[in-house]
Amino acid sequence: MDVVIGQLLTGMSTGSILLLAALGLSLVFGQMGVINMAHGEFIMAGSYTAFVTQQVLGTAGVSLPVALVTGFAVGGLLGVALEATLIRRLYHRPLDTLLVTFGVGMVLQQLARDVFGAPAVNVTAPQWLVGGVELFGTVVPKTRVFILVLATLCVLALTAVLRYTAMGRRIRAVVGNRDLAETAGISSRRTDLTTFFIGSGLAGVAGVALTLIGSTSPTTGQSYVIDAFLVVVAGGLGQLKGAVIAAFALGSLQSFFEYSTTASLAKVGVFLVIVIFLQLRPQGLFSLKTRSLA
């Protein structure tokens, strides 16, 4: 029983990391139909933002909350720049968005190498996140608990924005029927920019959080973007609750597979489970219902 509880807690920890990485992608990919392969590089930009912030401020306890805010802004502005210069010309051409954003991601990786160098850099965790906390007889690192709380807060904040604000209603209206929303006076152009800013900003927050559990390098984002896409597809396009369930389910599966095999075999096992699941339910856990005539 202790083993099961331990693996479940490990799985929730892994799932919270997947959720943070997938949250912004779910918003952009699911609600705008844009396959943003540069999402991983936005995560990387958030990680380097945390590194630079700590170099400037010096104190880890102060730099972390500042980095979360600046990481959101940096990721969001990168997303707005990408949408305004390239993506806006490629709506309704998802394969083209895939190729273009993949190229942008390669450029951002090289830019990071030129600025920070190829070797990985480290961000020091605040003293209050050092050590572990005992949950149900299992010691879990405080950094993992912090990421779990952060992911939960991001989900609640995004849900509140989409459900209870005028901006969220505009986003849902454009997703439901873009032409009808424009007829009602909603600027779909401004709504697209807002959606991309929020989705990319969440990638920046994910990047800051990931510095608490590992080093930062120009390829940091590539380690998470594929898993993030799997979470979005398995959860259902544009379905926030689907992304939450899929992230924790995949994290738990990986944790139990790793207990009896290796990390590489666990990845293969999770991938096979997703392939079988999508054969049975191609639309994912939840499907998006719209009134679009397209």
Image: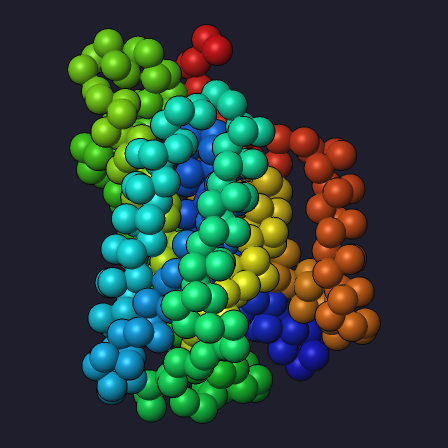
Residue 57 vertical placement versus 117 (above, below):
below
Residue 66 position within the rendered picture, expressed as x and y whole percent measured from the top left: 22, 71
Query: In the rendered view of the protein, which quadrant contains the N terminus?
Result: bottom right
Task: Specify whether residue 20 is in view.
Answer: no
* Residue at (49, 58) in percent of width and height: 109
* Residue at (46, 86) in percent of width and height: 133
* Residue at (29, 66) in percent of width and height: 68
* Residue at (47, 88) in percent of width and height: 132
Relative side of 78 to 95, left or right: left
Task: Specify whether residue 192 is in view.
Answer: yes
**Which one is nearer the viewer's eye here, 159 or 74?**
74
Q: Tell me, what colour scheme is on the image?
A: rainbow
Relative side of 110 to 167, left or right: right
Residue 175 vertical placement versus 82 (above, below):
above
Relative side of 272 to 39, left or right: right
**Which one is nearer the viewer's eye here, 67 or 120?**
120
Residue 18 position within the rendered picture, expressed as x and y whole percent measured from the top left: 53, 58
- Say which quarter of the image contains residue 64: bottom left
- Say which quarter of the image contains residue 255: bottom right
User: Quick one: which residue is furthest to the front in this view?
Assistant: 114
Residue 187 position within the rendered picture, expressed as x and y whole percent measured from the top left: 22, 22
Residue 50 vertical placement versus 98 (above, below):
below
Residue 252 position within the rendered picture, expressed as x and y whole percent measured from the top left: 64, 63
How many numbered marks appear?
0
